[in-house]
Amino acid sequence: MTSSKKIRVLAAKPGLDGHDRGIKVVACALMDAGMEVIYTGLRQTPSQIVEAAVQEDVDVIALSILSGAHDYHFPKVMELLREKKVEDIIVLGGGIIPKEDIPGLKDCGIAEIFGPGTSTEDIVAYIRAHVRE
């Protein structure tokens, strides 16, 4: 009998953003797709997110933000991952992020940004295609 390791995803809401319906919908879709999901809850600092990701040995960090603070929190998560020499975690972003901000977020290391209306099937497919076996 062969068993493959499940993809592990840390779902997080950085900053003071208090709206979590979207990340919960995504987390449920990822679980339905057979992934393990750890949801950190609301109002997490970048440091808390990175510590949890390292402790939980995740493959993906899925950040969701609606507050407009993505230009601070997303790069800070990437900076902290680099400081810890963590290079094998894919970091995704989602929420209300203006299109003009996406290139800067990708330049800092965010792998992909999923905006409102993105199908959960597209998110699942992206993760499956980009997580190393």
Image (tube, rainbow, N blue to C red):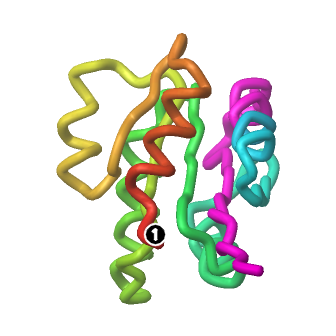
Residue type pointed to by label 1: Ile
Q: Horizontally, is 108 left or right of 93 in the view? A: left
Who's the residue at 35% across and 78% down the image?
87
Whether 16 is among the magenta residues is: yes
Q: Which residues are magenta?
A: 1-26
Q: Horizontally, is 41 left or right of 84 in the view? A: right
Residue placed most toward the observer, 121 or 105: 121
Please say if 95 is above or below 59: above
Whether 31 is among the magenta residues is: no
| Quadrant location of the N terminus in the rendered image | bottom right
Q: Horizontally, is 108 left or right of 113 in the view? A: left
Residue placed most toward the observer, 58 or 7: 7
Element type at mark 1:
loop
Residue 122 appears at what percent x and percent y? Answer: 49, 28
Toward the front, the furthest residue is 1
Please say if 1 is above or below 106: below
Residue 117 appears at what percent x and percent y? Answer: 54, 11
Residue 17 appears at what percent x and percent y? Answer: 68, 34
Please say if 98 is above or below 55: above
Q: Residues within 10 Å of mark 1 (few under 14, many from 20)?
A: many
**How many numbered marks have been drawn onto this rendered protein structure?**
1
Who's the residue at 46% across and 69% down the image?
89
Who's the residue at 76% across and 60% down the image?
36
Who's the residue at 78% across and 60% down the image?
38
Residue placed most toward the observer, 132 or 37: 132
Residue placed most toward the observer, 15 or 97: 97
Residue 24 appears at what percent x and percent y? Answer: 79, 34
Please say if 124 is above or below 43: above
Residue indicated by mark 1: 89
